[in-house]
Image (spheres, grey):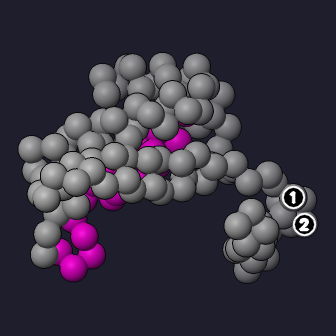
Amino acid sequence: MFRVRVFLIALVFALAGQSAAALTMPVKSVDVIVVAPTASGTPMVLKTVVLYGDLDPTTAAGASALLDRIRTAATRACTKRKDRESPRVPAEHYAACVQRGVADAVRLLDVPEIARAFDVRGQ
């Protein structure tokens, strides 16, 4: 899986005309995992990988951008299925699903700047 990610990122940079130095950028990622109830009552585990090798999460701007990516990933994981017929998460659990996914990813990263950005936004 790691080799596939590195290859795909290298391909994207090559196609974008980036320098060879950019191709050696380390792949950084965080898993956004949500465990959510379903209409049937059976919990569902959903995982999305967020890449952030292009960000410096130790700066305010980098932390804010990464937090936005994490929130987007959690929102997508908790939103309706592609067929749009049934929600992945019942409406009454949606906000908690997103909130917990974001909070768990922030805890997993353990970067003070991201934790501060998370706290400031009141999320």
Q: Is residue 83 magenta?
A: yes
Magenta stretch bounds: 63-84
Residue under numbered circle 1: 24
The image shows residue 101, relative to residue 4, as above or below, that is above
Secondary structure state at the residue bearing disc 1: loop
Residue under numbered circle 2: 20
Q: Residues within 10 Å of mark 2 (few under 14, many from 20)?
A: few
Amino acid type for the residue under numbered disc 2: Ala
Horizontal side of residue 62 vs 92, given as left or right: right
The quarter in which the C terminus is drawn is: top left
Q: Position of residue 92 (x, y in %)?
A: 9, 44
Task: Mark yes or no: residue 63 visible.
Answer: yes
Horizontal side of residue 113 vs 16, given as left or right: left
Secondary structure state at the residue bearing disc 2: helix
Task: State if disc 2 and disc 1 touch (CB < 8 Å).
Answer: yes
Q: Residue at x 65, y 28 (%)?
A: 58
